[in-house]
């Protein structure tokens, strides 16, 4: 056996291992931390979606001060759907809840399969399908303004938000610390992109979307270099790029929290979601 044959065999084995273990590498649910012990607010509604793999859990967290869809004089509020990073849970998104509640916006978070209390195996197809199923039901509520939908994702969640945006056009899209595509990142590990089962092609999605997009990124991000954000901004029809002096896991830093919130608010004002 020649050295070339040995190297080729080892490469095929390497690609095979990554193919079969890619779900755990891309969606490391075991690193997401402990579950929360309580719902974020007393008004939070826990939604259970039956799937072919069990049950997917979601939270609808109404904007504060709204009497709810069963009230006589309900006010339809904008809705933000938030997609967390691959080592997080919906239980940990207190800052995002506060951000949108301060703007008078209700929040929907659909937990990924295999994360938190959701059953099953995570993947692009599963998460997008579950989100669409829950979202379509929530958009029918009297206390939700379906014309003022915001999709917001962090890291891998940005890629998921972009895929959902292709199916349900939002009034505004926000992505932060997000890559051009997972399949594109595969070459960094010497793996052909066609082996990736959850490609999350944000670049292709951005090229098709005609909605205002806010792209937030850390200048010192070593996991998803800032060049990904710059490339996405060039691809999109209507994009605003805001770069912070932060890395992948510290965006925003405590002293940047106000600027981060202002960036989101201004984007939603420009999109007509909030006054």
Image: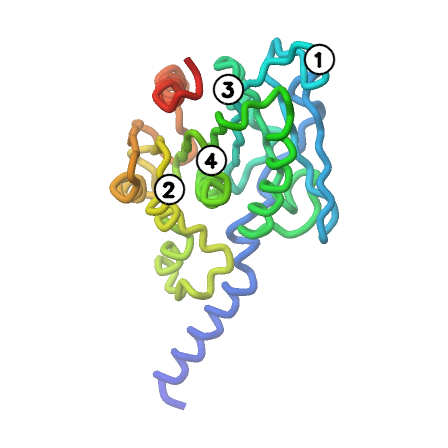
Comparing marks 3 and 2, which lies closer to the viewer?
2
Q: How far apart, in angstroms, are the residues tagged by discs 4 and 3? A: 13 Å
The answer to whether the residues at label 2 and label 4 have Cβ atoms under 8 Å apart is no
- In primary-sequence order, the first of circles 2 and 4 is 4
What is the CA distance from the residue labelled 2 to the residue labelled 1?
Answer: 36 Å
Dot 2: few (<14), some (14–19), or many (≥20) neighbours within 10 Å? some
Percent x, y of residue 165: 46, 40
Mark 3 or 1 closer to N-term? 1
Residue 178, given in percent of the width and then of the height, sits at 39, 41
In the picture provided, is 40 more to the left or to the right than 238?
Answer: right
Q: Badge 1 is on which residue?
A: 71
Instruction: Determine which residue is flagged by label 2.
Output: 209
The percent position of residue 44, horizontal first and vertical second, equals 68, 22
> Which comes sooner in the sequence, label 2 or label 1?
1
The image's mark for residue 50 is none
Q: What kind of element bears circle 1? A: loop
Which-is-in-front pick, marks 3 and 1? Answer: 1
């Amino acid at each position: 056996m020649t050295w070339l044959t040995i190297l080729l065999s080892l490469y095929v084995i390497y690609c095979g291992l990554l193919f079969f273990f890619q779900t755990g590498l891309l969606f490391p649910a075991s690193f997401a931390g402990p579950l929360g012990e309580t719902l974020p607010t007393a008004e939070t509604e826990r939604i259970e979606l039956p799937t072919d793999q069990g049950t997917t859990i979601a939270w609808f967290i109404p904007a504060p001060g709204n009497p709810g869809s069963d009230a006589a004089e309900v006010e339809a509020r904008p809705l933000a759907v938030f997609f967390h990073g691959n080592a997080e849970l919906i239980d940990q998104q207190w800052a995002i809840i506060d951000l949108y509640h301060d703007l008078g916006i209700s929040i929907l978070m659909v937990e990924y399969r295999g994360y938190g209390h959701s059953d099953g195996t995570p993947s692009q197809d599963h998460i997008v399908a579950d989100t669409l199923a829950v979202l379509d039901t929530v958009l029918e509520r009297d206390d939700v303004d379906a014309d003022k939908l915001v999709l917001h994702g962090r890291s891998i969640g940005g890629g998921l938000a972009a895929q959902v945006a292709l199916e349900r056009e939002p009034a505004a899209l926000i992505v932060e610390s997000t890559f051009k595509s997972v399949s594109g990142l595969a070459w960094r590990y010497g793996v052909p992109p066609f082996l990736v089962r959850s490609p999350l092609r944000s670049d292709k999605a951005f090229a098709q979307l005609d909605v205002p997009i806010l792209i937030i990124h850390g200048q010192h991000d070593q996991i998803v270099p800032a060049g990904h954000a710059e490339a996405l901004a060039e691809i999109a029809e209507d994009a605003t790029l805001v770069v912070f002096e932060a890395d992948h896991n510290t965006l925003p830093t405590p002293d940047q929290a106000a600027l981060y919130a202002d960036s989101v608010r201004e984007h939603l004002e420009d999109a007509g979601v909030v006054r």
